[in-house]
Each structure stands twice: as C-alpha cells, then as structure tokens.
Amino acid sequence: MADQRDWVPWHINIDEPSAARLYDYLIGGGHNFEADRALAQKFLKAQPNARTIGAMNRAFLRRAVKFLFDQGIRQFLDIGSGIPTVGNVHEVAQELDPECRVVYVDYESVAVAHSRMILEDNDRAGVVQADMNDPETILSAPETRELLDFSQPVGLLMVGVFHFVFPDKDPVNLIRRYREALAPGSWLVISHFTSDLEPEEMAAIVEVMKGSRDPIHPRSKAEIEELFTGFDLVDPGIVATSLWRPDGPLAPGEDPKRAGILAGAGRKRED
C-alpha cells in the first residue's frame, strides 16, 4: 500500500506508529503508514488472531449502537472513535433514524482529518479533536454542545479505547466526570483489552505496544465492571465481545476464549 501523502495533515510524524492507524490496518483500512504496518506485524506475531479480534470488536460496536437505539437513544458521544471505516456509529444510527446525532472524539490527527472529510455534508454528526483524559474540553467543545442535548439521555461509547488509560489517570474518577454530565437514562458502552482470556498473548501485545505512542493497560473483568460505577449493567454483563447479545450463532473463528476483549453496556441510574 502506497503512502498517500496528499491526505496526511502536515504536522503528522508518519514514522511514529499510532494505535488508531494500527487498528485501521488490522481491520483492512487504507489510512496507515509503513511504521504502523511494521508494528502490526509484531502485533500479529504476538496475537495471530488479531484481525478476528478487531472484527469482533467492530461487530460489537454495531450491535451496541442498535441496542441503544432500541432503548430510545438518539444521540451518541463516541470517545476514541478512530479512523473512519465501514460501520461507523453515524452510519448505523442514521440508517435507523436519520435524525440521530453523533459526536466523534479522537486525539489522532489522521482519524480526525478523515472524520471531518466524511462528515462534511452531515449536519447531524461532528468531530472533536481532544484527549479522552480531558472530559471537560470534550463536553464543552462547540461541536458537542451544538449537536448533543445533555438534558436528554446520551449513548457514551468507549469502544476499544479505555485500555489506553493507565491507573495513574484515576480511571473510575475519569468515568465519573463523564457520568455527571449525562442525564439519567444515558448509557455507557465499553470494550476493553483483558488478560483474563489469553494472558500470554496479551502480555506479548503489551510489550509490542510499548513501541508505539499508545501503550496499553489491560484490565480484568472485575476492573472493567468497576468502570461502570453508577451504571446498571445490562445482561449478559461483562463478557467476550462475541458473546454480547449476538445476532445468532457464532461464526467460525468467533471463539469467545480468544476474543481478547471484554465488553458491556450499562444504563445510568436515576438520580
């Protein structure tokens, strides 16, 4: 794949791999560079099932958005949205109801640039460039305030991103700062790398990601459940992505024991 420098923001260091572009490569996207692909090969050596894990995570996101829609959610805040690919939140939600509103948030410049390009003619979706560790900036951003009504329930999505938050960032308190801005009846959706399923492979992934600007911190099921403080988890609770409300029988390769990622959704309790 040739590097297409015409779509690269001028300030991007393409020699430094990023998690967003690594993920883009693993799920078959076209917005990644040589350094990202080199890191991906190390990632695949550590976890040969990585492409399937990525696909299961994307499938979980689609099911979660549809589930939230069925619960009456019509506005979504997608933190760590990554580089746009097939099955984006706004595509899933607006296919169900064109009036759904979506705000994407990412700190990766390529992800933000392509999101803005794709959303240029969509007045019900926008993008904010910010770090998820700074909820006040995200929640007060003009795009957020223009598109989302925080007096009404919001679907807060943190899919495949919270493992970039290390313990020194006080993760439970970080979620609380988002939760306090949400109306009762809002939802939190999380998917998260874990060492519970394949500890040796996950330990190898942790080592690989130390070579990027986005190291990761896997969490146990109990630690992920703690992130849902103030939310009531919906059945089936925190499970492997492929086991979270599947549409039907699992496809070949969707082995829950090899999912690598745990996921769940919870509804904010009434005040």
Image (cartoon, rainbow, N blue to C red):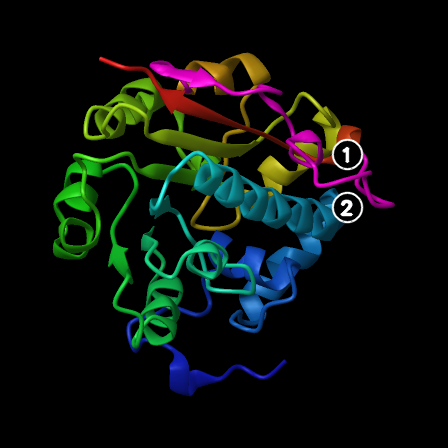
In percent of the image, x 47 and y 64: which residue is there? 84
Residue 49: image tag: 2
Q: In the picture shown, does residue 127 fall above or below 227?
A: below
Between the residue at mark 2 and the residue at mark 1, the CA separation in whole angstroms equals 8 Å
Q: Is residue 1 left or right of residue 32?
A: right
Amino acid type indicated by mark 1 = Arg
- At x 49%, y 84%, the residue is 4
The verdict on residue 45 being magenta is no
Q: Quadrant of residue 174?
A: top left
Say which residue label 1 marks: 258
Q: Quadrant of residue 227?
A: top left
55 left or right of 165 in image: right
In the image, the segment drawn in magenta is 228-255
**Residue 135 pos. (x, y %):** 22, 37
In the shown orientation, is residue 144 left or right of residue 16?
left
Q: Choose between 106 and 121: the one closer to the eye.
A: 121
The spot of residue 16 in percent (x, y) is 45, 61
Closer to the N terminus: mark 2 or mark 1?
2
